[in-house]
Each structure stands twice: as structure tokens, then as C-alpha cells.
Image: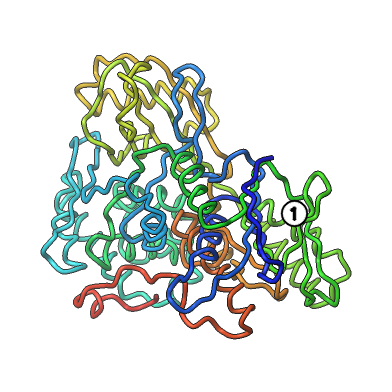
Amino acid sequence: MTESAVAEPATRPRIVIIGGGIAGLSAALALSSPPLRGEHSTDCHVTLIESRSRPGGRAGSFAEPISGETVDYCQHVAMGCCTNLLDVLHETELIEHFTRYDDLHFYHPGSGISPFRASRWLPAPLHLQPALAGLNYLSGKQQRQIRLGIWRLMRATPAVIAKIDAATWLAENGQDDEVRTKFWDVILVSALGDIPERVSMAAARKVIIDGFAAARGASDVWVPNRELSEIFGVGMTQRLRDRGVLVRTGATVRDIRRPDAGGYAQVAGVVLGDGETVPADHIVIATNWRSASRLLSSLGGQGSSPVLESWSRGLVATLSSIELSPITGLHLWFDREITSHPHVVMVGTTAQWLFRDPVRERADQVAGCYYQVVISGQHAWSHAPRNGLVEQVAGELRAAFPAASDARLLHSRIVTDPAAVYRLSPELDARRPPASTPLKWLHLAGDYVQTGWPATMEGAVISGRLAAESILSRQRDTSPLASLVLPGLRPGWLARRLIRPIW
């Protein structure tokens, strides 16, 4: 166990954050930022407890033994619409470790590479017209279908989309199977981790409207140019320690100790694996939903009132019902560069995204030229032998890029996280819990919390800020004077007239 010790007056509120993923890091940053948004008092003692040797959660890296390189488990990217994540990166001066791209490249086996660049002078949402026209694997009729679908999605009301899956809505709004395969599925499966038949249309609308249509710059892609473990595990953790946050790693939380008097006294605590109890005035559960369910289950049996027992059981049932969706990262080392594009969206192939090595300073490319292919959700090769998947994807890359036709694959590794994201069905979307709980001292953070976003880094950051808001409002016994959560990009004048507001 390692820690950064800071002497604190006993009178300061003691806040313990369980979990050092992006949600927990975001909560700790919000609570250690004096002042944040100008009106909040953040004079508190924050302890962040992480079971691993380094914070970062799913935004992590590993040392690949054969190549000797440190690579990310799975490629993470942000978009211009991720205002809270980008704000955190600016606040911690880590934004320099991300590279912004204002264009995408789509590959289709029948037509090769198509550029996708939104207009920088047309107002949103008209700025998407030249980008859509640039996808040369879509016929004119198919592009008209897509424009109709986007228009109807802009005008959709919450009541219409809240209880419907994306596939049903698309079929009811003139999107045929081929258009779905070539456009909608390409975007939604990557963003939501599953096929449209199993995801909420409200979440799909968030991706399409906030991520592309509402504002210029929303679809910009921000790609890390350093390993995630360096950005979040080292850089962001050091920023927290510089602000006086006590970061404890290698410490497992075994249990949560409730205060007396029905949960409204001022002394709660977390019990660590070695039996140590860390006292707290407020506790934030910022773990993944599986660990949160375990901790909440133990909490419910400590003599709580019938109302709190019912709440605890209901929340545990919701978290236990979450269906998992995998993400697979194929790490590939070729003997030469196969494409100069930094990233390519792959359409009509098993591969969904290709990323060229974003860390361009590896020593002389000793292990070869590194690329990562990302595949979200279940796919035709999910249960096939791993070498079969590698051969399939390598064949697709050789067909896609002339420079790859004679390239030799030196080494490969497949990393699949079966619980990378959750399946955001309409039913789950309606049951996602808020950050605040009936217990004044207990708060939730994590991408499963109701943030309006699917399982993304942006959703995780928002959840951490919502948990911080909940703590500050409980400390003041009043609503916060200003939200810690930034709004999305402001829609342009035309978008405000054309897009029905749901935000």
C-alpha cells in the first residue's frame, strides 16, 4: 500500500472516495479545487482509495511482454462534445497529452477511403452536409434516408424516444437495413457497445445529436498521445496529491460502516481488507457497478429502516441486472507502416476502428509498427479461436491499405474486457440511479449513474462532479449555488431553432 500523507485539521469534513477510476478522480478533483465555479466551498479532507497499484480504472495500460512496450488495454478517445472531460484535462494541464483531429476517414471495401469533415463555415446542423456527401460508399438515395433520419431525430421528443430501442425507432423512421449497416450501426455500436436492437434510442440520440449535429466542433476527435496509465494513473493522481488529496493505492475496501442514529449521524467509515477503518463524514462509491452492488448489499443489512432497506434492495437489483457488453482490442505489430492515417473507421468489416500508434516516440519502432484495432460488442468471431480473429482482421487491413499488402505481422495480442461497458437498454436507462442517495453521507459516482450519457469517459467525469455537488449541497443543507457540471457545447443559432431541446 502506498499513500501520500497530509496533515489535516480534524474540523474539516472527511470525504472518502472508493475507487480511483475516472469517476473517482473527477470527484476528488471537484472537491479539491478551491474554488470551483466560484461559489462552492471545497474546504475538506479528501481520501481516495484504489485497490490497484495505480488509479485510472478502465483507462489503463499494460506492459506487453514480447514487444516490451506499454500499450493501453483499449484505445480511448474523447470528442469535442465531451465538455466536462476536456475541462478536467485543461484544469489539470493534461490536455497536451491529447491530439485533436477535426476530420475522420471511413473505409468501405467497395469504395476505399472516404473523408468525413464537417464544414467550418456552415452553421450547425448544416455543417454535416459536406461530411455526409463525402461518404462515397453511400448512394444519393441512402444519403437522403440518413438526412431524413437525422432531421426526425432532431425533432423527436423525450416521450417518443425514452421507452424505445434504437432499431425500432430507425425502422419506423425510414432507415432500411443497408443504411443501418453502412451508417447508423457503424456509429452506434462503437459509441454504445451493442447493436441498436439492444440499446436505448435516447442514448443513440445523445450520440448523434450532441456528438455530431448540434454544434460545430462536437465531432472533433481527441486521441491520447501518451499511455492512459501515464495520463490518469500518474499525471492526474499527482495533481490530486499536489492539492492535498490523500491517495491510497493497493487498498481494498471490504465493507462500509454506517453511522448510528439511522444513518444520519456524522461518523461513517470504510473498512479496509486489513481491518483498518477509515472514518468519513461523506463516502462516495465510485467503483464499477459490480463492486458498488457488493458494497451496497453489505450496507443494507446494518439495521436500517424499512424505507432504506427497500431503497438498498432496489438499487442492488438494478445494478445486478446490468448486462455487460465487451470491447476487444487487437494489438498488432507489423514490419512496416501500413497507413499514414492516424485513425480509420472501418465499415463492412470485422474491424471497427483502426488506430495508428498514438505514441510516436517509441524508440526506433524496435518491436515493429504498432496499430490497434477496436471491436465493440459481440461479433461473428467472438467465440472463434484467437488466431482466427487475428487472421481475419489482418486480411481486412491488407485489403484496405496498399502499403499493408506485403506487410508482415510480427506479433499480436488480443485483449478483451467482457465488462468494458454496460448495455444501455431503455429499461436500464429509466432506472439509472442519481448520485445522491437517501443516506445523507453516501453518494454514488460511476458511468452507470444517471448522467444523460452512456458508458463513456464524459459520463464518468459528470458522475464524479454530480457526487461532489451532492456532498456540497448536503454540507450546506441547501441546493448548490451553481452546478459543477458544464453544459454541452452551445448549439448555434440555427441548431437552436431546428433541434428540439432535450438538454
Q: Quadrant of residue 42?
A: bottom right
Q: Is residue 231 above or below residue 334?
A: below
Height in image: 470 above or below 278? below
For label 1, the crowd category at 10 Å Cα-Cα, with few meaning under 14, some 14 to 19 and many 20 or more, is: some
Counting from the top left corner in percent of width and height, residue 490 is at 29, 72
Quadrant of residue 12 in the image? bottom right
User: Horizontally, is 273 left or right of 187 in the view?
Assistant: right
The local secondary structure at tag 1 comes to: helix
Residue 159 visible to the viewer: no
Identify which residue, 397 or 494, lies in the foreground: 494
Q: Position of residue 442 (x, y in %)?
A: 69, 68
Q: Image point 75% across, 56% down: which residue?
A: 295
Image position, residue 212 (x, y; %): 28, 60
Q: Residue at x 17, y 45 (%)?
A: 115
Residue furthest toward the right?
303
Colour scheme in use? rainbow
Which residue lies at the image location 24% right of the left edge and 42% below the top edge?
Answer: 106
Q: Position of residue 386 (x, y in %)?
A: 51, 23
| Residue beneath disc 1 | 294
Task: Locate the N terminus and report the quarter of the image it occupies.
Answer: top right
> Viewer-proximal residue, 44 or 497?
44
Closer to the camera, 33 or 461? 33
Q: Is residue 157 left or right of residue 52?
A: left
User: Which quadrant is the C terminus positioned in?
Assistant: bottom left
Amino acid carrying label 1: it is Arg
The answer to whether residue 459 shows anywhere in this view is yes
Write the residue at 56% across / 45% down: 55
Q: Nearer the viewer, residue 79 or 405?
A: 79
Image position of 180 (left or right of 235):
left
Quarter of the figure with residue 27: bottom right
